[in-house]
C-alpha cells in the first residue's frame, strides 16, 4: 500500500448525517485538502436527490478541495475520483478483473454498481470556494435491488463479489494516495490523459446504451467522452452530446 499523501488532511468521524454536508460546514475553515471519513452516515446523499443507504462497514467519505479553475474544469474531478477509486479497488483486491467505470462516475464490479460519487460545490457560479467529492463504496453490504430505480444496474458489494473484507479505514488508505496521484496528473497535464485512462476502463464503450435525463431519453452507440466530460452517443439522429443523464444498459 502507498503512504498517506503529503499535504492531505484526514478526519475520521464515528457518525455524521452526511460527509458531504459536513464538508460544506467545515470547508471554509480548512487550509488545504482534507478527507472526511464517517464510519456511519445517517442521511447519506446520492446523485439526483436520491438517498444513499450506508450501513456500517461500508465506505463513506468526502474529499474537500479548494480549486481555482472555472466550474467546468472543476467538475472534471469526478473523472479524477473515478480513476482513483478504480486504483484503490485494484490495490485492495490485488487485481483489476471485473472492474469498469460507468459514465459519469460509477464503479462497476462484475457488472454491478459497487461505488458512486457525488461531487458538490459551494460558492457562486463563477467563484467556487470549495468542492466536496463524496464517495460511497459498498464494501460490506449492497442495497437490495428493490431499493434502486427500475432498470438500474444491480448494486453489489466488494465482499459479496470477491470474498475480500476491507474496512473503511483500509480503503481510505488505498484511495487517498491514488487520488493524490491522479489529481497531480490532472493539474500538470489537464484532462486529456485522465480522459484517455477513463475510456480505457469504460463500461460498454462501443455498445448501445440509453441515456435518460429529466427531459428525455436517447439510445445510441456509446462513442466516447469528449474533452468536456460529456457522453457522446451516435444515434439515429446523428452524433449527440449529453452533459447529464443516467445510463441504462
Ligand atoms: O448516487 C451516487 O451514486 C453517489 C453516491 C455518493 C454517496 C457518498 S457517501 C459519502 C458522501 N456523503 C454523502 O452524503 N454522499 C456521498
Image (spheres, helix red, strand yellow):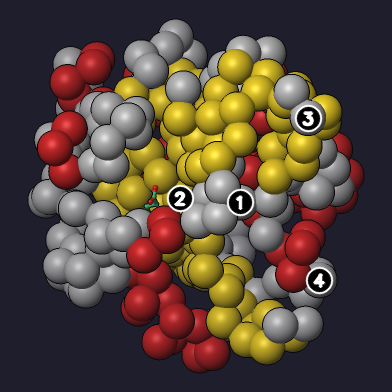
Residue found at the very far top of the displayed protein: 97
Image position of 48 with respect to 65: above or below = above
Q: Earlier in the sequence, mark 3 or mark 4?
A: 4
Badge 1, how many Cα within 10 Å: few under 14, some, many 20+? some
Residue, far front: 237
Label 3 neighbour load within 10 Å: few <14, some 14-19, many 20+: few
Residue nearest the viewer, comparing 189 with 105: 105
Residue 245 location in percent, x, y? 55, 47
Is label 2's Cβ within 8 Å of ligand 1? Answer: yes
Q: Which percent across, then down, holds residue 173? A: 40, 44
| Residue underneath mark 3 | 237
Viewer-closest of 125 and 182? 125
* Numbered label tally: 4
Which sits earlier in the primary sequence, circle 4 or circle 2?
A: 4
Disc 1 target residue: 244
Residue placed under numbered mark 4 in the picture: 70
In three-dimensional space, the C-alpha distance between marks 4 and 2, rounded to whole angstroms, equals: 20 Å
Disc 4 secondary structure class: loop
Callout in the foreground (2, 3): 3
Q: Residue at x 44, y 9 (%)?
A: 97
Amino acid at each position: 500500500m502507498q503512504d498517506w499523501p503529503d499535504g492531505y488532511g484526514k478526519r475520521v468521524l464515528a457518525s455524521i448525517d452526511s460527509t458531504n454536508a459536513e464538508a460544506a460546514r467545515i470547508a471554509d475553515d480548512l487550509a488545504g485538502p482534507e478527507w472526511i471519513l464517517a464510519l456511519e452516515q445517517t442521511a447519506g446523499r446520492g446523485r439526483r436527490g436520491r438517498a444513499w443507504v450506508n450501513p456500517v462497514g461500508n465506505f463513506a467519505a468526502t474529499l474537500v478541495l479548494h480549486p481555482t479553475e472555472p466550474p467546468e474544469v472543476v467538475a472534471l474531478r469526478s473523472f479524477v475520483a473515478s480513476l482513483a477509486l478504480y486504483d484503490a479497488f485494484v490495490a485492495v483486491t490485488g487485481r483489476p478483473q471485473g472492474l469498469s467505470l460507468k459514465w459519469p462516475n460509477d464503479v462497476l464490479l462484475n457488472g454491478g454498481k459497487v461505488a458512486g460519487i457525488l461531487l458538490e460545490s459551494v460558492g457562486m457560479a463563477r467563484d467556487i470556494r470549495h468542492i466536496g467529492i463524496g464517495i460511497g463504496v459498498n464494501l460490506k453490504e449492497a442495497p437490495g435491488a428493490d431499493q434502486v430505480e427500475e432498470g438500474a444496474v444491480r448494486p453489489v458489494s466488494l465482499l459479496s463479489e470477491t470474498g475480500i473484507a476491507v474496512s473503511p479505514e483500509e480503503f481510505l488508505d488505498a484511495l487517498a494516495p491514488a487520488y493524490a496521484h491522479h489529481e497531480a496528473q490532472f493539474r500538470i497535464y489537464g484532462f486529456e490523459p485522465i480522459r484517455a485512462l477513463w475510456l480505457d476502463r469504460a463500461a460498454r464503450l462501443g455498445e448501445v446504451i440509453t441515456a435518460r435525463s429529466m427531459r428525455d431519453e436517447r439510445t445510441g452507440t456509446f462513442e466516447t467522452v469528449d474533452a468536456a466530460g460529456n457522453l457522446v452517443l451516435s444515434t439515429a439522429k446523428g452524433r449527440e452530446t449529453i452533459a447529464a443523464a443516467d445510463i441504462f444498459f
